[in-house]
Amino acid sequence: DGSAAAAGAQTLVDAGVIGVVGAACSGATMGANAVLSAAGIPMISYASTSPALSDATAYPDFFRVVPSDALQGQGVNAVVAAHGTNGGDSVALLYMTNAYGAGLADAFKGAYEADGGTLCAEVGYDDTTTTDFSSTTRAVSDNGCTTVVMVSYAVDGAAIIEQLASDGFSGQIVGTDGIAEEGIATEMSDQSLLNGIIATKPASASTNEVAQTFAYLCSLSTDCAGGIFTAESFDAVTIMAFAAFTLMANPGITMSQAIAGTGAGWVGASGTTSFLANGDVPGAGYCVGTFTADATTVSYDCTQHWDPAGGLSTV
């Protein structure tokens, strides 16, 4: 929540911090940035992907180790065209109305309509208050939609998937990075419903020793293995920590300058990071993963890759 994040940010300002890791959701980041940037305190988000955050004038001293969702929307559109029922000609869009959900939904809708498509149904919902999704999914069955694109987090995403199953929906579900981890299974009473669902998430760049070591150590921890944006969180924390040492070793520079310098070719758990002038990272395209699940096991495997230059390809 933006207001809660702003209040939390003020607490950090009062405590005298020189840098902040986070926030997670884009709306919270926007609220926190208004307070932190006014105090000259930079932040590095590990999960905020709203396209609006690319505006360095509106959100100064902001960095993120994940790419903007402006591109992910195009990637989801390519996945729908390739894997949607009947070529994705009858698509329902279900999305959270927060900054992340609305931004990514708009990006997908823009790409889908630019290709000549017309949405079969479009329903937004408040992820902080909605617990019964029967009215959210009703538009899918009422309009005979055969493919569902959902922009959600794990908790609400799991509830939507189960509600669609209860409604008798049997078409293709395409999700985004909010559900693109095996951890979503812990939110479901019947994890087998995940089988065949496709979800996109930012792809890791070429592997390195840090990424390999982190992946191994993460696999040994139940909390880490079932989490999302874990490698990105690790990178945001370590970049911030090393930037603090850079600041101390170079009197006269700002913390934002220290972060920008530290993040130039930073070899991290999520790949090699190089911040752009506006604090964004160019990213390495998107993993297009498919869930394989039954009552006892679940896996999420990146079977395809999408980027704006090469399009959709098998990996």
Image: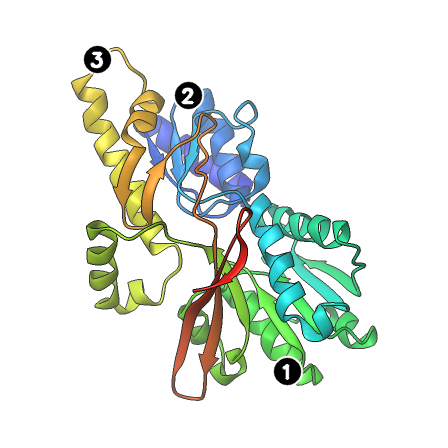
Q: Nearer the viewer, residue 78 or 8?
A: 78
Residue 26, disc? none
Q: Nearer the viewer, residue 127 or 153?
A: 153
Residue drawn at (58%, 73%) of the image: 159
- Tell me the distance, in whole angstroms, between the alpha carbons under discs 2 and 3: 19 Å
Residue drawn at (42%, 54%) of the image: 203
Q: Which residue is mark 3?
A: 251
Does 142 appear above or below 67? below
Residue 235, percent across and down? 30, 44
The quarter in which the C terminus is drawn is bottom left
Q: Is residue 6 visible?
A: yes
Q: Secondary structure at mark 3?
A: loop
Q: Which residue is mark 2?
A: 39
Q: Is residue 83 left or right of residue 63?
A: right
Residue type, mark 2 in image: Ala
Q: Is residue 178 visible?
A: no
Q: Is residue 55 left or right of residue 42?
A: right
Residue drawn at (49%, 84%) of the image: 192
Residue 281, percent across and down? 43, 38
Image quarter of residue 145:
bottom right
Q: Which residue is mark 1?
A: 165
Is the residue marked by circle 1 packed among few (<14), some (14-19), or many (20+) residues within 10 Å?
few
Image quarter of residue 118:
bottom right
Residue type, mark 1 in image: Ala
Is the residue marked by circle 3 packed among few (<14), some (14-19), or many (20+) residues within 10 Å?
few
Which of label 2 and label 3 is nearer to you?
3
Residue drawn at (70%, 82%) of the image: 167
Q: Nearer the viewer, residue 246 or 18?
A: 246
Residue type, mark 3 in image: Pro
Residue 142, percent across and down? 82, 75
Residue 249, percent across and down? 16, 19
